[in-house]
Amino acid sequence: MVIDPPVLVLSLPRSGSSWTGEVLGHASNALYLREPVTQGAAEHGDQTFYYRGTVFTLDEELEPRYRALADRAFGAEPTFGPAIRRFPDQWASETPRRLVIKEVNPRACAWYLERYRPRLVFLVRHPAAVALSWQSFGWVPATPDGWAFNGRHQAEALRDALVAFSDYPMRRIVQYEALCADPARHFEALFEFAGLAWDQWSRDLVSASTERVSDRSGRPTREMIDAWRGKMPPEHLAALREGYRAVDLPWYQRDSEW
């Protein structure tokens, strides 16, 4: 039995949503799917979403494929592979569970909210940390122009989501840096909002995830807050900031944050 409404953890790629999604998805009453839309097509050899850059606006060509995967996910179908259906024991349980889905296309936010009416956990992270991680995958050219373009690209995707959820009542916006600084407090609030069981198992899980690893770096989570600083040329950072600030957003606007 699946409890309504589902929970959607949504962010740009490399924004800490894997950590956030897995902590929420590990709850004793959760049923977790990791990127069933983004990765679901790739399970069957369809790389279309990847070639579109993962973060894109749905069009008439791609919407039917996107919808087919999302309907399977929000219908809690246990047909996804192990990389998506991360905790198989959850699916064998007969106790009522709340579906938690983690996805990484903020430009699809309005579409998700209109179609599935989930409780939305929207995660944002400093654009320099995101860009640095994207560059490590070859997604951002190592030039000032490439970083300027990426800054605007990130900001425009976040703006699309912001417009979509500005009047949506069932949402929480979380900054990755705040989550790293005080995981127990912020996760407890997210568990309560999501309708997930905050118990000793959850407390221990948050503690273990904080001490063990964040973003596969081997660092304690709190050290990830400013881990990007000093790791890119100043001209790249300046270009990224200019591109990002060209779009009106409430996050990462102060000079002190850069």
Image (cartoon, rainbow, N blue to C red):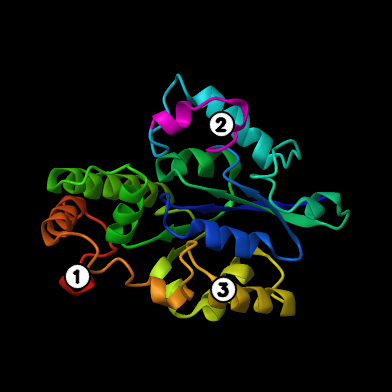
Eye-nearest disc, 2 or 1:
2
**Residue drawn 41% across and 25% down?**
59
Q: Which sits earlier in the primary sequence, circle 1 or circle 3? A: 3
Relative horizontal placement of residue 13, taking residue 79 as reference (left or right): left
Q: Which sits earlier in the primary sequence, circle 2 or circle 1? A: 2
In this picture, is 251 found above or below 112?
below
Residue at the spot of label 2: 42
Residue at the spot of label 1: 254
Residue at the spot of label 3: 212
Cα separation, mark 1 vs mark 3, equals 31 Å
Q: Amino acid at mark 1?
A: Arg
In this picture, is 86 found above or below 182?
above
Q: Residues within 10 Å of mark 2 (few under 14, many from 20)?
A: some
Which residue ends up furthest to the right in the rendered image? 94
Residue 50 at x, y percent in the picture: 44, 33
Q: Nearer the viewer, residue 72 or 33?
A: 33
| Callout 1: SS | loop
Eye-nearest disc, 3 or 2:
3
Magenta-tinted stretch? 38-52
Residue 170 appears anywhere in the view:
no
Q: Nearer the viewer, residue 203 or 215?
A: 215
In this picture, is 43 found above or below 101?
above
Q: Residues within 10 Å of mark 3 (few under 14, many from 20)?
A: some
